[in-house]
Amino acid sequence: MSEPEDDFAALFEASRGATRLERGQTLEGTVVAIGPEVAFVDVGGKGEAVIDVGELKDEAGALEVAVGDRIQAVVVSTERGLTLSRRLARGAASDRQVEEAFRAGLPVEGKVERAVKGGYEVRIARHRAFCPISQIDIVRDTDPAGHVGHVYAFRITEYKDGGKDLVVSRRALLEEEQRARAEEVRRSVVPGAVLTGRVASVVEFGAFVDLGAGVQGLLHRSEMGWSRVPDIMEVVTPGQEITVKVLRVDEGTQRIALGLKQLTADPWSTVRTKYEVGQVRTGRVTRLAQFGAFVELEPGVEGLAHASTFAPTGQAGGWSRSVPVGTTATFEVLGIDVEKKRIGLALLPEGSGRSAGTETALDAPEAEAVREYAEREDAAPKEAFGSLADKLRGALKPREK
């Protein structure tokens, strides 16, 4: 390719970069050349911009920068290339520039000089402006004096009497920046992504996590740990920084579902090698239901001892009195379904002489019944547990001589 074509390609790429910028955007670049009237600033992949040399001089007319220095400036025009203004960024704007900034919606820098009734007095170049207290920040500050002395970027919302009456807002710019950052954050929030956030609030059903720029996702209590979480505050607290995994994103409602337990190994992944039908395991009763007792065998691995596996009491629900929540006892493993994360259990009677870790010495018919249960996916729980429990109880009774 010839040299003119190379130059044209470079200019074309630079112009493409320029069109992606907007007026009012703050850039940082390197001064590459200083001419009699304008200086050229390299703003990276966005191309090359120009700035009036007068904006690079101090009050005495001496240049404040040299070739190679980096400066910060505001985009004031994207037509026919990029035009920057450093004075707007530095708060030293002229009367004409202040008016142009108002009409174009460009930000200007101002210093908060003092708190006044209902807001703040802000100095912008030679102008004094008023910023309502509701427009100084996104979050209402409990200490209004905390902003005094700070230099912020403001947007001029009212311009009257030739600039003698100015009303400015910092909040408008902060909200725009937040929306822009929120869009960037949302692009990174995809299922499977691992992100760092901060717990914004804790509620009964989980915690809301701020992923940045106000984008929040819900960490449901069921996704906090592989075992049941009785107290959310034991896992997360407001203000805590945590790493979470994105589980789902609802494009319509923008709701984000997060997970914490997914960042650790699923305890069910080792169940197939650690548990066998016929084993005796120690477990703790975690909750009771009408149809049986849920038993934690290890953190994250829970089994069900169906009501039909308990000794008859003659009273409806009487079985539950023998295993109140918190009870630790030994249970027989009746069936295992790793895919559905189900383990069937039966409470061993006291004095059976069997301890955790042992295996049941079942006759061939009983062992076959156990295998049938494990392979029976659609069997009614009561029938499956009932018939099998009867056989197990029969197998465990002392043989009559």
Image (cartoon, helix red, strand yellow):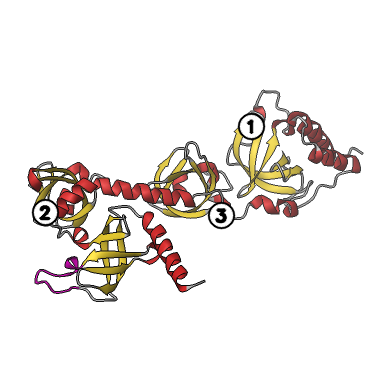
Q: Which image quarter: residue 58?
A: bottom left
> Which mark is on residue 320?
1
Residue that appears at 28% across and 49% down = 174
- Of 347 and 26, nearer the camera is 26
Q: Is residue 35 left or right of residue 18?
A: left
In the picture, measured across the screen, residue 212 lies left or right of residue 222, that is left
| Callout 1 secondary element | helix
The picture places residue 93, in percent across and down from the top left corner, at 15, 58
Write down the residue under mark 2: 95
**Mark positioned earlier in the residue sequence (1 or 2):** 2
Q: Nearer the viewer, residue 334 or 7?
A: 7
Q: In the image, which is nearer the foreground, mark 1 or mark 2? A: 2
Q: Is residue 199 left or right of residue 383?
A: left
Can you tell which mark lies on residue 16?
A: none
Query: Of tags 3 and 1, which is closer to the observer?
Result: 3
Nearer the observer, disc 3 or disc 2? 2
Residue 59 counted in the magenta span: yes
Judging by the rendered image, the residue that carries numbered circle 3 is: 263
Decide which of tag 3 and tag 1 comes sooner along the chain.
3
Residue type beneath disc 2? Asp
